[in-house]
Image (cartoon, grey):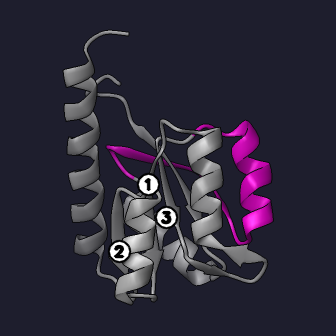
Amino acid sequence: MASQQRLRVFIVDDNEMTRDLLRVIIQGEQFDVVGDAGTAESAKLRLRSQKADIVCLDVVMPDGDGLSLLEWIGQKQPQAAVLMVTASADRSTVEQSLRNGAKGYIVKPFTPGAVMDTLNHVVAKMRAARATAGPA
């Protein structure tokens, strides 16, 4: 990942206003929002053909839960860093998300600063891991 390359972000949330707000916050010099989905099933369909560097993922959706989708993303796009974005701040959900591979957790309602701080923290960890791994 070149340092100048914009990272591709995909947003999964059943609330359209939340998806739109995240898109406005994230889209910019460093990030390119490449798509979004309002259900787990539509996320799977779109992520089969759309590569993402980062996936912002809600926990509660009308047709499934984000924890199951987190595992699916880990299998289908293991290079993607998943950030849970949810109103569910209970300890067991946070711990299960992190155990299942989430790289960060943003609690709703969020501020633009909290979203960008979490994204930048995850990007720094991604770049450090790739630098340590060396050239492919």
Q: Residues within 10 Å of mark 2 (few under 14, many from 20)?
A: many
Say left or right for 14 vs 9: right
Of badges 1 and 2, nearer the viewer stands 1
Q: Which residue is drawn at 39% across and 36% down?
A: 6
**Residue 112 percent across, percent down from the top left:** 29, 74
Q: How far apart are marks 1 and 2 (CA)?
A: 15 Å
Secondary structure of the residue carrying tag 3 is helix
Q: Quadrant of the N terminus?
A: top left
Q: Residue 106 carries which label?
A: 2
Kind of residue at badge 2: Ile
Kind of residue at badge 3: Arg
Secondary structure of the residue carrying tag 2 is strand
Say left or right for 109 vs 36: left
**Residue 42 percent across, percent down from the top left:** 79, 61
Q: Residues within 10 Å of mark 1 (few under 14, many from 20)?
A: some
Residue indicated by mark 3:
23
Between residue 57 and residue 25, name the one nearer to us.
57
Q: How far apart are marks 1 and 3 (CA)?
A: 23 Å
Between residue 33 and residue 118, name the one nearer to us.
118
Q: Residue 101 carries which label?
A: 1
Boundaries of the magenta span: 28-51
